[in-house]
Amino acid sequence: MTLNIHWRLDPAADPQRSEPGAWRPLPALARDRRTSTQNRFDYYVQIAQAAAQTAFDGLFVRHRIAADESRIIAAIVARAAPRLNVVPEFPASVGSAVYAAKQATTFQRATHGRLAWAIAPDAEATDRLAEADSVNDGDLSQRLEEFLTVARGVHEQRPFSYKGAHFEVENGGFDAPLNRVPFPRIYLQGEGEAALALSARHADVHLFQPAFAETLANDIARLNALAKGRPVEAGLIQPLLVREDRESAERDAQRLPLAPGTLVASYEEAAERLAASPQPGSRNWCWRQFPRWRKPIALASIFCLACAPSPASRNRPPEETVPMSIDFYWRLPTHGCHNSIHTSGYERGDWSPLRPGNIAPGLDRNGSADDFTYIDHLAAIAQAAESVGFQGGLIPSFPNTDDPWVISSLLARETKSFRFMIAFQPGFGNPVHTARMAASLQRATGGRLLFNIITGGGGPAQLWWGDSFAHDDRYGRTSEFLDIFKGVWESSHFSYDGRFYQLRDGGLAPVLQGEEFPEIWFSGSSDAALQTAARHADYYLSWLEPFDQLGDKFARVKERTAALGGEQKCAVRVDLVARATEEEAWADIAKGFDNVSEETRQRWRGQATDSVGAARQAALRPTDARRYDELIVAPNLWGGFNLLRGGPALGIVGSYEQCAARLDELIARGTDAFILAGTPHLEEAYRVGEEVLPLLGRQVPALLAAAE
């Protein structure tokens, strides 16, 4: 019988290990080389790497309200321990089942299918309400059933529709390449008949608590009878306190608080006892040594050394104030990338069939797929952008893209200063769970998280997510979501009674409190969007529009914010084709335009949406253009970028000097920050960072004269 043995990581255990403020001070004669770049996540990685280097098959990350979010931990340690399977535990109250499934596909793609889900038991009603979970006790089982049904349904079927008491989806489901990975194995828990029946229908593994062999055998027999031939494996969660000899183990057991069912024994005794456990039919073990790593049974010699925690004080010195400081971000393409602006195929990533010339994955010298995944390519883009001076990158989220939360977590330890701008719709998740995820990611990255809050364009694309709210209702929900998000961030006992959300005494766990609140970048062009942005946003973000039109929009946003007693900054998201000369830039545009297929042209003409911003973009271009120059909107502004790649239509085309001059014009019209992009994103990050950004801040006439 093959056994799967996982180690259990408890995020709340051993808080002195790399926990800010919990260091034990060194004596004065010892030189202290610990740095502020080390934090609690270094300890999680250390545990994962220790487990991966031994006989353990995976890491079970426990759900703890008073600690870091399990899914963020799982994504971060997965990159550091490339052999290890990871099983984050979380409750069904996390939010949208569609969004949870989408996060899982990104995780599976990036880790070669190493993810499983463990659904945490539901908390008591008062604790659930503190996390904005107001579902009645009697409905919890039905919600979990629907959550698993919808998550698996959108993963395995296209189209998938479902209407239940808690979840609703219309024409959902994932397209290639997101549907090419396996759905996560499902671990469920519980001892009663109802719990076993639910596992019989949905689980791949049912986890039992420690019990006598006869009791465990009877429970497994009941599970198999309920499953009626459906394969459901049995698992055992077994806390351990093992030492070199029984005397040492029993001595430690007297002074340490132990979990129920903890096995206290010497290494040899524990190995003998555990070897008997599979006899009743248990094939999956989850072990937990108490209180920390020693030498796991007879499997391998491992020692988990304490990694250096971060300093007691995380206060940073104030940054030097620079007059008129402009922030520049790059964009990470979460949907694959082209090798050139001339081509329509996605040669980077697995959105297109694997063929010679592709990368991440690519073909090795034997014609076989190599071991690189798309996350490796995204890491290269982030590192390139970081190296040339971009503060960070926008990580978009659309139905056929990888998920920005998982990407940010996976890349967190591969960058040093790169900030992760997660595009997020409030309909995707519960506001309290989202705050916990955000605070965990802030801890993991040293405060490098920010949000691009989007509210959705309506129509079929919005229903794909399982979101049927009307346009203005979506903005109302967004406003309430952000009220709660900020409320629980700033208060340990925050209550809220809104139209869309109700909360009683919610707040973040002490270990998550005190992190820097993420910047909010807000998108949307309707009156409802502008009103919500005025209340909540640090930056109002717009696609590029003709400069006069954009300046008027920015003026309206700043006027509304000022009326509320605030101050609003404005930002522009824009693609560039910057070359040494204007002729080279337009030649590349012309070549790309000539290669556009008729199918792409038809798709470009649009689909149903209630997005005001999309309508404004559509109004910029003729629908029957047959020459690239018919789409020139103004000097150096071209309205056909969405023919060459997904996204907004209008972008900047010209020489390095001309592109810098147009950006300077936008700054003069009230732009405080930019999200720039170019295709292919890796090479263009270097080109724009090295050739265009250094030219900014000069006089526009001088730049244009230099271009001539």
Image: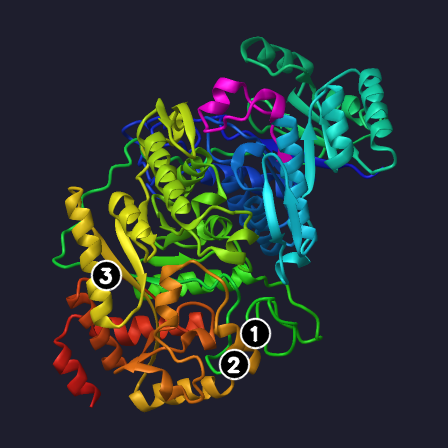
Q: In this figure, what is the number of numbered marks?
A: 3
Q: Do the numbered discs 2 and 1 sit on residues whose CB atoms are within 8 Å? A: yes
**Closer to us: mark 3 or mark 1?**
3
Disc sitting over residue 553 in the figure: 3
Q: Amino acid at mark 1?
A: Glu
Pick the residue in front: 294 or 634: 634
**Closer to us: mark 2 or mark 1?**
2
Q: Secondary structure at mark 2?
A: loop
Q: Do the numbered discs 2 and 3 sit on residues whose CB atoms are within 8 Å? A: no
Where is residue 552 shown, x and y percent of the image?
20, 63
Pick the residue in front: 166 or 688: 166
Dot 2 crowding, Cα within 10 Å, few <14, some 14–19, many 20+: some
Q: Is residue 440 left or right of residue 202?
A: left
Range shown magenta: 118-139
Disc sitting over residue 343 in the figure: 2
- Residue beneath disc 1: 347
Q: Is residue 136 above or below residue 581?
A: above
Q: Residue at x 80, y 25 (%)?
A: 277
Dot 3 crowding, Cα within 10 Å, few <14, some 14–19, many 20+: some
- How far separated are the C-alphas under marks 2 and 3? 34 Å
Where is residue 6 shown, x and y percent of the image?
67, 35
Where is residue 264 shown, x and y percent of the image?
67, 16
- How far separated are the C-alphas under marks 3 and 1? 37 Å
The quarter holding residue 180 reads bottom right
